[in-house]
Amino acid sequence: MMKKLMALALAGMMTLSLAACGNSNAPAASSGSGSAGSDEDAALTYAVEAGSAGEEVALENGFSVVSVDSQAKALMEVEAGTADAAIIDLLMAGAMVGEGTSYPDLKVTDQKLNSEEYGIGCRKGSDLASYINAVLGEAYADGTMQTIAETYGVQEALLPQETSEFTASEADSDVAYIQDKGTLIVGITNFAPMDYEETAGSGEWIGFDADMAKLVAEKLGVEIQFVEIEWDNKVFELNGKTIDVVWNGMTLTDAVMEAMECTNAYCQNAQVVISK
């Protein structure tokens, strides 16, 4: 029941917020705390997740930041009064901020700093990205992807997926490597509504990204394992083969796409400002 209520609330918020975001070249909307890049903004301290799109956009705007190891901790900084505001993903804000959420005393301002898209990250040159694209295309065509999106209230953010054929690497195939070891290891952070534990400490991960990753593991014929990582270390985790894929509402920045083999974009998002 709680998951359904969260999905309904998030879907409503996404309908309004994404319509207001426009495209990635649109100027940021102003809010009670000033427009992006103003002197008033520069005087504030923003809590951001290290290595995130939120940190990147804050630094681009010349904001003073305190970097923490998760978006949830960025919200904690604002709640505790050790930061004036936080910059987090719109999708997370809908699930975590406001009445009936974990942070009922915080609010999502109307200050949206960008418009962006999520993708899934694999090792550079990995054929796993091609495999995932094929599964996403099939899941979108038969409606499975839309059904999962509706479960978590992210259907308004979903991007259409084209059908495609998997192209295996002739040598050093990640798909073959994963099938041989029998487990797909997915790097995540605790990030509702994409990857989260419905019951804290249960080790049972749900969410839009988690459920789509489970579908890919099923198609591969392997087990799935979710591993919490420090977001700033995601490329090191991939290259060290402690994880096989980063699937956690990852923004497709230039730096990310240079460091990883990324899938097609599958969700829209924005970086938003959270305050008391």
Image (cartoon, grey):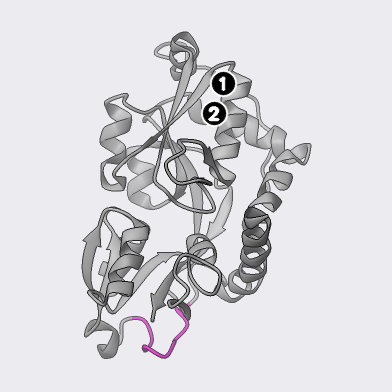
Q: What secondary structure is found at the residue carrying circle 2? A: helix
Return the x and y of residue 77 as percentages of the image width and height: 28, 69
| Nearer to me, 269 or 191 | 191
Residue 136 is at least partly visible in this image = yes
Q: Which mark is residue 258?
A: none
Q: Is residue 174 above or below residue 261?
A: above
The residue under the point 44% across, 78% down is 105
Q: Which residues are magenta?
A: 27-36
Residue 142 falls left or right of residue 86? right
Which circle marks residue 130 in the picture?
2
Three-letter amino acid code of the residue under disc 1: Thr
Which is nearer the eye, 88 or 257?
A: 88
Q: Nearer the viewer, residue 233 or 260?
A: 233
Closer to the chain start, of discs 2 and 1, is: 2
Distance between mark 2 and mark 1 Cα atoms = 6 Å
Indicate the quadrant where residue 167 lies: top right
Q: Quadrant of the C terminus?
A: bottom left
Residue placed at 43% from the left, 76% from the top?
106
Residue holding disc 1: 167
- In the picture, measured across the screen, residue 127 lies left or right of residue 78, that is right
Q: Secondary structure at mark 1?
A: loop
Determine the residue positioned at 25% across, 89% down.
39
Amino acid type shown at disc 2: Ser
In the image, residue 266 lies in the stretch drawn in magenta: no
x 29%, y 28%: residue: 239
Residues at circles 2 and 1 in contact by the CB criterion of under 8 Å: yes
